[in-house]
Image (tube, rainbow, N blue to C red):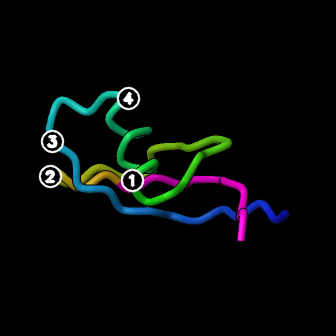
Amino acid sequence: MDILTKNIDLELNLPITTESIYNALAQRGIKPLRFAVVKVSDDILTLNVSYENLC
């Protein structure tokens, strides 16, 4: 098991909620250990996400 950290861009509708972030990450198969918002531009949210690599 490895822990990966990378930036991920998500396209979300306003207002952005923690639940919408978790749902968008789950759709990509990511169960985050932690995430931080690093950039917001229009409806694109850039997150720095750490998660377990299960493959």
- Residue at which label 1 appears: 27
Left or right relative to 29: residue 51: right
> How many angstroms separate mark 2 from mark 4 (CA)?
19 Å
Nearer the observer: mark 2 or 1; the answer is 1
> How many angstroms separate mark 3 from mark 4 (CA)?
12 Å
Residue 46, percent from left and from top: 38, 56
Circle nearer the N terminus (4, 1): 4
- Residue at which label 2 appears: 42
Nearer the observer: mark 2 or 4; the answer is 4
> How many angstroms separate mark 2 from mark 1 (CA)?
21 Å
Circle nearer the N terminus (2, 1): 1
Q: Place residue 2 in its image quadrant.
A: bottom right
Q: Which mark is residue 43?
A: none
Residue 13, percent from left and from top: 15, 41
Residue type, label 4: Glu
| Residue at image point 31% right, 56% down | 10
Q: Residues within 10 Å of mark 2 (few under 14, many from 20)?
A: few
> How many angstroms separate mark 1 from mark 3 (CA)?
15 Å
Task: Report the front residue among 45 and 55.
Answer: 55
